[in-house]
Amino acid sequence: MGKMLRVDVLTLFPDMVAPVLGQSMLKRAQDKGLLDVKVRNLRDFTEDRHKVADDVPYGGGAGMVLKAEPILRAVDALVKETEASGGQIRLLFPSPQGRPFTHAYAQDLAREQRRIVILCGHYEGIDERVRTALSPEEVSVGDYVLTGGELPALVLIDAAARLVPGVLGDPESLSEESFSDSLLEYPHYTRPAEVRGLGVPDVLLSGHHEAIRVWRRKQALRSTFLRRPDLLRDRVLTHEDQRLLNELMSEDVSMVPMYDAGGGVRS
């Protein structure tokens, strides 16, 4: 048995999370025993008969705020359950105020030995006393606002789970994906060979593996240069990457003003 990624999701809306976990790669990872995800309803940790887990904000204002007590009880229960088996938890809280979620962050989660607990806020947020009492690790999936933390939680789980050894059928696909070496991915094509008059690059039909590798690398550099030049700006280019970028400049003069022939991308 390989390493297992263990995750608990605390949410007011389990049905926003659970169905996705039963599909595609996430389902296969669980079937293989490489991923264990439990979705916990915060209402189960309330103590009133109506199972109220949110309330109006003090001081007035629009929207509702998640109450502190159910969250604190839920985390206490998970800590107790985990410590009983000699483990620890790592508490994450998706929030626009958090550290940006990156490929390196996903790699860190994939290697995590602790039980990952993801607290999903909703509505206007959570009672600030949760932050004060628990000091969760805040993480942001982007500079925008979502209705709740359920979609970010799925992003964290998906990005981390695919990096757990054995989850993906072809290990090579990891090394070729976007951001695995700070480059965007090259274009992909599949059958048929022509769609509405659009063909497939000849090199991909050639069967020449080295030529295909070089073409893909060149296309990855081109995509990164045009769409995310910041990823190249501080990168130390290999001799091959430098040569391929120079070739790109000679083929597309519109790229030249953005490029420093000394080996860098201009701001």
Image (spheres, rainbow, N blue to C red):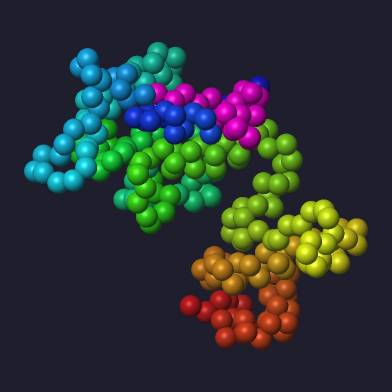
**Residue 69 in the image, given as x and y percentages of width and height:** 21, 25
107 and 49: which is toward the camera: 49
Q: Residue, x 73% and y 82% (percent of image)?
A: 251
Direction from residue 67 to residue 243 in the image, left or right = right
Q: Position of residue 18 (x, y in %)?
A: 49, 28
Identity of the residue drawn at 72% across and 73% down? 244
Residue 126 appears in the picture as rendered? yes
- Residue 113, visible in the rendered structure: no
Q: With respect to residue 8, does 243 lie above or below? A: below
Locate residue 239: give its quadrant.
Answer: bottom right
Q: What stretch of residues is rendered in magenta?
A: 21-40
Q: Quadrant of the N terminus?
A: top right
Magenta span includes 29: yes
**Foreground residue among 139 and 232:** 139
Q: Nearer the viewer, residue 44 or 264?
A: 44
Q: Is residue 156 left or right of residue 71?
A: right
> From the viewer's perspective, is residue 122 above or below residue 88?
below
- Tell me the quarter of the picture where residue 187 sits: bottom right
Where residue 50 appears, as percent x and y from the top left, is 23, 19
Numbered label tally: 0
- Pick the front one: 45 or 8: 45
Identified at 64% across, 23% down, the residue is 31
**Residue 142 image offset from top left, x and y in percent:** 41, 54
Relative to 150, does residue 188 appear above or below in the rendering? below
- Is residue 127 on the magenta stretch? no
